[in-house]
Amino acid sequence: MRSPLKATIAVATTATIASAAIAPVHAHAIEIAPPNAAVEQLNELANRRVAVGPLQATLGQIAGVIAASGVGIAAIALAVEAVKWRIDEESPKEGAGSWCGTLELEAELYQRVIAHPAQYAVVGGSSNFVPDGTYSYALVDATGDRKPELLLRQNGTEINPVTVFTVRDYTIVSMKTPLDDGASSGGGFRATVFGSVDGTGLYQLTRSAGEAMHTLRTLKLGNGNLEETARQEVPATGGLPQNVKPLKWCSSSDSSCLRNAN
């Protein structure tokens, strides 16, 4: 998953675009876009400032340069990957700051989810699950691209359902099958969702009171569903594998975690 469109270079008007302080870099892919669509994409993102190293120009300025140049506008070739590659290389990586700041699109889309969680949560949970009207969320990289997925938990009694979201092609996508997180009032059954340290997926741990072994499932994000890639039994008293990462849950009423999560 790549960063959202940050800027464009009109291949036929490189000298003109250079005046907007955007220098061409390696173009890994060329896309042809209708001129109106190109300018609309830029204008839609014009309030997001590119401030990574030398790339210090607003998208609105770039859109203006393209629109005013009048040079082959009908056949502009958008070197989309060129600027995205430059930004990816020069942007802070995970561990060097917050998730967002360079991930404006993810933050914006996830903000919509936590602002109206009831519209996005997948129905699930145990048969005795009674929602209490509150939601929690966590951020963790589950695809290995150093960008966070969003986990939305509907809180209540018994086993709480957890919906997983990711961003693909600038659109938020939810996994249809929820994970389980919580404890059953009868039988001592518990379920916990974990992230992975290396971003290779998610973990679902299930266990029952008194059992010597617990079940740990490894899951990856598929095409609309979570797919199990591995399953292992772990001792109740022996701890979990090193790659298992506990999640930090935040209230959906607190959006600051979107900006400060690592």
Image (cartoon, grey):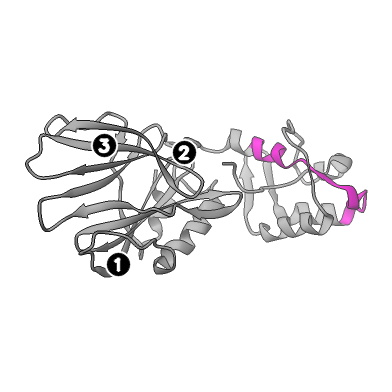
Residue kind at label 3, given as amino acid type: Leu
Q: What stretch of residues is rendered in magenta? A: 68-86
Disc 2 crowd, CA 10 A, few/some/many (<14, 14-19, 20+): many
> Is 144 displayed left or right of 34 in the figure?
left
**Residue 105 picture location, percent across and down:** 56, 53
**Residue 85 picture location, percent across and down:** 65, 35
Residue 219, quarter of picture: top left
Disc 1 crowd, CA 10 A, few/some/many (<14, 14-19, 20+): some
Q: Is residue 53 shown to the viewer in this render?
A: no
Residue kind at label 2, given as amino acid type: Thr
Location of mark 1 (residue): 134
Front tag of 3 and 2 = 3
Location of mark 2 (residue): 143
Element under disc 2: loop
Location of mark 3 (residue): 216
Element under disc 1: strand
Disc 3 crowd, CA 10 A, few/some/many (<14, 14-19, 20+): many
Residue kind at label 1, given as amino acid type: Thr
Residue 242, quarter of picture: top left
Element under disc 3: strand
At 42% across and 36% down in the image, what residue appears? 95
Q: Nearer the viewer, residue 227 or 60?
A: 227
User: Would residue 15 be counted in the magenta stretch?
Assistant: no
In the rendered image of this protein, does residue 36 appear above or below residue 242?
below
